[in-house]
Image (cartoon, rainbow, N blue to C red):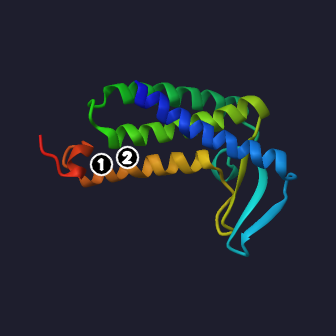
């Protein structure tokens, strides 16, 4: 339980801290080139889900996020004690979902700022969710039974 709390809290602090910095140091729609024409910090407010789909559905996304966090918590507690790969992936998804949930509850929008110019602007919570989902998919497709211990070469 401590692993869950510390991991999710770390994701939340990094996500919310980065968004706090952007909101307090940039104007809405402002863009700062980091690597010109490739990567910029661009402050936007997203009223929808990924890629701005279903705009202005705040209550819907709040409810979906709450359900997702509850289901992820139940899933986490079903995992074997030493299955740190799946636990880490689940914590990444949960921390990201909570980070965007906090934005929706506080602001009615999600703060996005990572802009690679070939992809819609996103944030660190989105990154945590994507990495967590990717890791779970990798675990499912690289093991016989979906247990991540086999990724590390351990045998039951």
Q: Are marks 1 and 2 in contact (CB under 8 Å)?
A: yes
Extreme residue toward the left, this view: 156
Mark 2 nearby-residue class (10 Å; few <14, some 14–19, many ≥20): many
Query: For residue 99, which quarter of the picture?
Result: top right
In-image side of 101 versus 127 (left or right): right
The residue singled out by tag 1 in the image is 140
The residue singled out by tag 2 in the image is 136
Identify the residue at image location x=35%, y=25%: 77
Q: CA distance from mark 1 to mark 2?
A: 6 Å
Indicate the position of residue 141 as horizontal and vertical percent values: 28, 53
Q: Quadrant of the C terminus?
A: top left
In-image side of 34 versus 95 (left or right): right
How many labels were placed on the picture?
A: 2
Judging depth in this view, the residue of 38 and 67 nearest the camera is 38
Indicate the position of residue 5 as horizontal and vertical percent values: 48, 28
In-image side of 2 versus 153 (left or right): right
Indicate the secondary structure of the residue bearing disc 1. helix
Mark 1 nearby-residue class (10 Å; few <14, some 14–19, many ≥20): some
Indicate the position of residue 28 as horizontal and vertical percent values: 86, 51
Q: Which mark is residue 41?
A: none
Query: For residue 74, which quarter of the picture?
Result: top left
Indicate the secondary structure of the residue bearing disc 2. helix
Identify the residue at image location x=48%, y=36%: 7
Identify the residue at image location x=51%, y=29%: 69
Identify the residue at image location x=56%, y=51%: 127
Indicate the position of residue 14 as horizontal and vertical percent values: 61, 43
Question: On screen, 77 above or below 139?
Answer: above
């Amino acid at each position: 339980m401590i692993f869950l709390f510390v991991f999710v809290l770390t994701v939340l602090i990094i996500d919310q801290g980065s968004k706090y910095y952007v909101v307090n140091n940039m104007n809405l729609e402002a863009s700062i080139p980091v690597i010109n024409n490739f990567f910029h910090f661009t402050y936007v407010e997203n009223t929808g889900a990924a890629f701005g789909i279903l705009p202005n559905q705040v209550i819907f996304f709040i409810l979906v996020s709450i359900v997702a966090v509850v289901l992820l918590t139940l899933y986490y507690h079903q995992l074997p004690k030493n299955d740190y790969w799946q636990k880490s992936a689940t914590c990444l998804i949960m921390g990201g979902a909570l980070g965007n949930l906090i934005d929706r509850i506080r602001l009615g929008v999600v703060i996005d700022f990572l802009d690679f110019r070939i992809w819609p602007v996103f944030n660190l919570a989105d990154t945590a969710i994507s990495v967590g989902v990717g890791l779970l998919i990798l675990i499912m497709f690289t093991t016989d039974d979906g247990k991540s211990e086999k990724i590390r070469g351990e045998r039951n």
